[in-house]
């Protein structure tokens, strides 16, 4: 399906010619909490055909050009799931500009770093998140303009993005685009205090989508059910790109709702979906509805482990086949997937998919034997099957990509049948409800409090959220502070999903002979005390 050096602009135009008025995007937005305008009193639905979507992308190209956006410029998409996100993403690609999507739950402090590091010139957002961006703009050297991207305003003269698009031409002639041009900067939390920006090219997106499409045998009659946020690689790489490549359609919800998941899935006649384990557990926590077995799902790919009992309950209640996968923002496509046909072991993350080669290595970089634990390394071509590198961070890039192998920091064991079982994250990372949380980011905030001497942030197992965040804190001498005060201190400086759920005060932290905090001992004690 991917021809030669096709790029995203060519792909969208080609699918418009091939599929015309066939539905591509079906969108539903529920009323937004906290917005009391008349236009926000009921659900909003929108449908775009392949032709209409291509025309809107062209209109957005004219609009962005009118704002001074040229090749290489970066725009920030601080948006929930909505058609505007997709239109701007592909318009930036057609202009040879770069999108930098951000989590709408990010605090002004977190968002400011991403905007400044990426050099974003224009940000697109909604009324709900406008104030956060205004705070960022005050001290920004780059952010020139904030554009409102929804129609919640009752002001008839409000110059929203949608209103501006209607005035633009539906035809646009793009300049020269190569498949190695950067399309996006996807920031991902790491073990350091600052996020790293994964550079994503046209070829990266195409390879990711093709890997998923081939693995699940996606075709033009399929419909992807998209509830995960578009600012994540999952919804972009696995769902949107695979659908575009195959001429399939997308049912896009503005946000995940456990109570409505299968009702909407059935209503929109979706056939494939992508999820994380945490939202799946939330779905399973809902009251059982016999009618939910009447869905058309033929495959749900998901990341992160479910228990054997949860796997069985999912199958009994929903009869929606599951396939666990493993991938990273840096690997683009899921490098490991449980196969569509034949034996499937969903307590593992599957076998190598597409053109990916997987090798498990020890701390010296040597391959380990079958049955032994090792770090997952992925063989790929930078800028095509794996990321081209970290934005403005050549040192981190060299550390991650060595001789064509991407060192992931995740540990696994390969069994005798070629399936890989995920063990743990080598990096200091906490997984909370599908969100990556860098422990050091939270620690650096806690250490800003005058009463805190040292701390260690730990992820402990949580049945609903994958992991809950607990901070072990040692106070300075003669200092006092309550748990509530420290949590509130974090709340004003971190996105909600990064804020510790509990604070445990200790006299000291266990350390190695060279002074490194032994987090595994803290974690063990915390689990034992639960």
Image (spheres, rainbow, N blue to C red):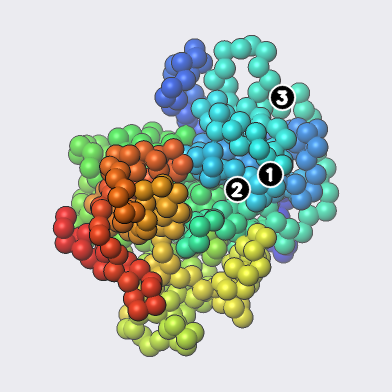
- Where's residue 65, x and y in %? 80, 37
Query: Where's the N terminus, which quadrant?
Result: bottom right
220 displayed left or right of 500: right
Q: Quadrant of the C terminus?
A: bottom left
Q: What residue would you read off at disc 2?
A: 114
Q: Residues within 10 Å of mark 3 (few under 14, many from 20)?
A: few
- Which x, y percent locates residue 491? 40, 39
User: Can you say whether 79 is above or below 206 in the image?
Assistant: above
Q: For this view, does 235 lie left or right of residue 162?
A: left
Mark 1 touches mark 2? (CB < 8 Å): yes
N-terminal of the pair, mark 1 or mark 3, is 1
Q: Which residue is mark 1?
A: 120
| Residue farthest toward the front in the current orientation of the protein | 478
For this orientation, the residue located farthest to the left is 529
Residue 52 versus residue 279: which sits nearer the camera? 279
As drawn, 321 above or below 162:
below
How crowded pointer 2 is (Cα within 10 Å; few <14, some 14-19, many 20+) is rated as many
The residue shown at (20%, 60%) is: 527
The image's mark for residue 33 is none
Q: Earlier in the sequence, mark 2 or mark 3?
A: 2
Spatial separation of the CA atoms under disc 1 and disc 3: 21 Å
| Mark 3, residue position | 164
Q: Say left or right for 414 vs 387.
A: left
Tell me which corner region of the image, top left, top right, bottom left or bottom right, holds residue 495. top left
């Amino acid at each position: 399906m991917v021809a030669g050096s096709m790029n995203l602009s060519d792909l969208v135009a080609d699918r418009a010619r091939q599929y015309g008025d066939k539905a591509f995007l079906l969108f539903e937005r529920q009323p937004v909490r906290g917005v009391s305008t008349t236009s926000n009193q009921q659900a909003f639905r929108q449908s775009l055909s392949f032709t209409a979507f291509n025309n809107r992308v062209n209109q957005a190209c004219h609009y962005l050009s009118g704002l001074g956006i040229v090749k290489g410029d970066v725009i920030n998409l601080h948006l929930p799931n909505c058609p505007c996100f997709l239109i701007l993403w592909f318009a930036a690609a057609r202009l040879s500009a770069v999108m930098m999507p951000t989590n709408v739950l990010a605090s002004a402090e977190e968002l400011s770093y991403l905007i400044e590091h990426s050099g974003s010139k224009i940000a697109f957002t909604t009324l709900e998140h406008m104030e956060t961006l205004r705070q960022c703009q005050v001290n920004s050297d780059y952010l020139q303009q904030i554009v409102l991207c929804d129609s919640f305003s009752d002001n008839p003269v409000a110059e929203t993005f949608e209103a501006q698009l209607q005035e633009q031409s539906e035809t646009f002639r793009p300049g020269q685009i190569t498949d190695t041009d950067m399309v996006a900067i996807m920031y991902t939390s790491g073990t350091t205090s600052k996020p790293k920006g994964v550079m994503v090219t046209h070829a990266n997106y195409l390879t990711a989508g093709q890997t998923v499409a081939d693995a699940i045998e996606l075709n033009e009659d399929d419909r992807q059910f998209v509830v995960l946020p578009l600012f994540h690689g999952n919804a972009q790489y696995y769902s949107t790109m695979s659908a575009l490549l195959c001429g399939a359609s997308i049912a896009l919800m503005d946000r995940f709702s456990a109570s409505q998941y299968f009702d909407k899935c059935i209503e929109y006649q979706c056939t494939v979906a992508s999820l994380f384990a945490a939202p799946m557990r939330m779905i399973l926590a809902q009251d059982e509805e016999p009618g939910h077995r009447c869905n058309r799902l033929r495959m749900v790919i998901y990341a992160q482990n479910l228990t054997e009992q949860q796997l069985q309950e999912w199958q009994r209640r929903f009869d929606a086949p599951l396939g666990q996968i493993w991938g990273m923002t840096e690997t683009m496509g899921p490098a490991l997937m449980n196969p569509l046909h034949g034996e499937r072991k969903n307590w593992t993350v599957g076998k190598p998919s597409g053109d990916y080669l997987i090798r498990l290595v020890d701390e010296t970089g040597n391959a380990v034997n079958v049955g032994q634990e090792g770090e997952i390394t992925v063989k790929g071509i930078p800028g095509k099957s794996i990321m081209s590198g970290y934005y403005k961070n050549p040192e981190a890039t060299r550390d991650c990509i060595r001789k064509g192998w991407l060192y992931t920091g995740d540990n696994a064991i390969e069994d005798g049948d070629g399936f890989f079982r995920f063990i743990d994250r080598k990096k200091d990372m906490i997984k909370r409800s599908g969100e990556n949380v860098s422990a050091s980011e939270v620690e650096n905030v806690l250490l800003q409090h005058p009463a805190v001497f040292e701390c260690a942030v730990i992820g402990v197992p949580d049945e609903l959220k994958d992991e809950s965040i607990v901070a072990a804190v040692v106070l300075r001498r003669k200092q006092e502070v309550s748990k509530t005060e420290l949590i509130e201190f974090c709340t004003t400086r971190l996105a909600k999903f990064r804020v510790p759920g509990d604070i445990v005060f200790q006299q000291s932290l266990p350390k190695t002979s060279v002074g490194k905090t032994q987090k595994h001992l803290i974690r063990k004690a915390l689990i034992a005390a639960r």
